[in-house]
């Protein structure tokens, strides 16, 4: 393995771990990033000559020396940072603590604008650069960079502590971390710059760090289930809805991993949003064994979700499942409980409405709903799929 490949592997696994240690003293993420970047640059020079036995320890030693350099220069004292011999670094640090959980809580701290928490976590814990994050969030790189710097500056100015919250505040703070991770995963999963793998990395990391939290395990299960179907979503360049996907194209290893997370969550006995969402995905996954979709079970789960975590998405999904169980009229009635303006601005609601209207013979109304859904949809494969559904109504429009 080349030095460049080895460094890329270490950076992926250790960037957030090392940054959390370096930034915890003084809450200065910017200085810690500079020091860690310097350490990786020196690794490119020294590792091809001699690879240290403990790369993390080597990087941490170099970065700490660089931090000392930065701090001493602030005090107008000249300092020459040193690169340790491989044996020195290995002997100095035997076990590096994993403080990434603390770093996640810092990124999702109440003092930080909720809109920047996900990008901040992606940069500090995963190590993505501002340009990559900006593409995923459809922002100019300069704008994203400024927002990230502003958030890091606030962390330092507010002296946000690098710590795991006390038990009485843990649930609320964990929820913010989960929302940030789910926000990364939910970013346009059909796009070229989707962040699904980075979100899964964060979710599994959090599950390792908080193995007794049911919602943490539930989120890991949700993302694993959804990733397992990634290759089946687009076939021959065309979008394939979940119920029409060929289970043979699902990733069995990821499905098993998701099922394991869900089983562990259920054994804890604390029901929550992500655990219920994971159960929904498990019902769909069971089609691999049964060959059918249990719409009754899905309607039941979505009804529960609507009480635990009411959202427009949950209501639409419940209506869709109910329509399969009780018929399109009942499904449409459930859908129409959503405020008309809200419904008109949410593409999935228009898709379900169009489907039910077409089944009920209200073709013109169905065509209008499809037109609105297409106008609200950005992803090209999904737009093409909806356009085809709309065109299929044409022969019936004036008959």
Image (cartoon, grey):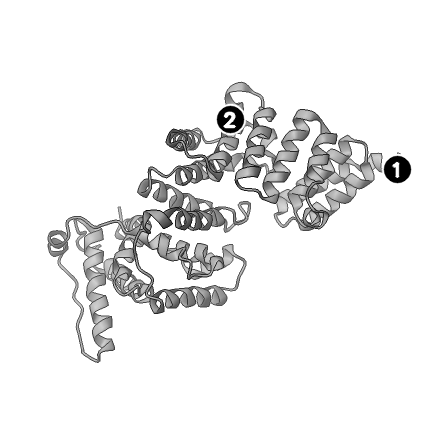
Q: Residue at x 32, y 40 (%)?
A: 208
The image shows residue 365, relative to residue 86, as above or below, that is above
323 relative position to 172: left or right: right
Residue name at image x 49 percent, y 31 percent:
279
- Whether residues under marks 2 and 1 lie with C-beta atoms below 8 angstroms apart, the answer is no
Name the residue furthest front: 168
What x and y, as percent, mark residue 238? 62, 38
Q: Rounded to the nearest whole Å, what is the CA distance between mark 2 and mark 1?
A: 41 Å
Res 350 seen here = yes
Q: Position of residue 125 (x, y in %)?
A: 35, 53
List the residue tagged with mark 2: 248
The image quadrant of residue 79 is: bottom left
The vertical placement of 90 against 77, above or below, is above
Q: Is residue 160 above or below residue 246?
A: below
Residue 11 visible to an observer of this rendering:
no
Which quarter of the figure has residue 30? bottom left
Front-most of 254 and 42? 254
Observer-nearest of 30 and 84: 30
User: In the rendering, at what x and y percent does residue 358 appear?
Assistant: 77, 34
**Looking at the rendering, in which quadrant would you find the C terminus?**
top right
55 sits to left or right of 359: left
Q: Which residue is mark 1?
A: 398
């Amino acid at each position: 393995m080349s030095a460049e490949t080895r460094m890329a592997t270490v950076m992926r696994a250790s960037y957030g771990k090392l940054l959390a240690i370096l930034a915890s003293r003084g809450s200065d993420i910017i200085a810690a990033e500079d020091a860690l970047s310097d350490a990786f640059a020196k690794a490119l020079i020294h590792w091809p000559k001699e690879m240290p036995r403990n790369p993390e320890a080597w990087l941490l030693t170099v970065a700490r020396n660089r931090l000392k350099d930065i701090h001493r220069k602030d005090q107008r004292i000249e300092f020459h940072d040193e690169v340790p011999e491989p044996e020195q670094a290995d002997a100095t640090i035997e076990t590096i603590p994993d403080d990434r959980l603390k770093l996640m809580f810092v990124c999702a701290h109440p003092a930080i604008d909720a809109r920047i928490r996900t990008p901040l976590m992606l940069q500090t814990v995963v190590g993505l650069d501002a340009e990559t994050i900006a593409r995923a969030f459809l922002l100019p790189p300069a704008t994203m960079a400024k927002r990230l710097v502003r958030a890091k500056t606030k962390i330092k100015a507010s002296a946000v502590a690098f710590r795991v919250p006390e038990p009485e505040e843990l649930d609320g703070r964990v929820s913010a971390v989960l929302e940030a991770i789910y926000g990364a995963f939910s970013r346009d999963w059909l796009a070229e710059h989707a962040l699904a793998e980075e979100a899964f990395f964060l979710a599994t990391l959090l599950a390792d760090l908080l193995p007794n939290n049911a919602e943490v395990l539930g989120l890991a299960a949700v993302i694993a289930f959804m990733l397992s179907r990634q290759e089946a979503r687009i076939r021959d360049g065309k979008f394939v809805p979940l119920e029409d996907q060929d289970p043979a194209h699902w990733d069995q290893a990821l499905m098993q991993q998701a099922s394991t997370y869900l089983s562990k969550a259920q054994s804890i006995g604390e029901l929550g949003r992500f655990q219920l969402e994971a159960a929904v995905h498990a019902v769909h996954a069971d089609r691999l064994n049964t060959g059918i979709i249990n719409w009754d079970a899905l309607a039941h789960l979505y009804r529960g979700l609507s009480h635990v975590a009411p959202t427009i998405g949950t209501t639409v999904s419940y209506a869709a499942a109910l329509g399969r169980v009780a018929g399109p009229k009942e499904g449409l009635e459930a859908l129409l409980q959503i405020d008309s303006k809200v419904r008109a601005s949410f593409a999935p609601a228009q898709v379900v409405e169009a489907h039910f209207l077409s089944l009920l013979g209200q073709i013109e109304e169905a065509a209008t709903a499809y037109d609105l859904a297409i106008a609200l949809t950005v992803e090209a494969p999904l737009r093409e799929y909806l356009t085809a559904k709309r065109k299929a109504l044409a022969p019936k429009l004036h008959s």
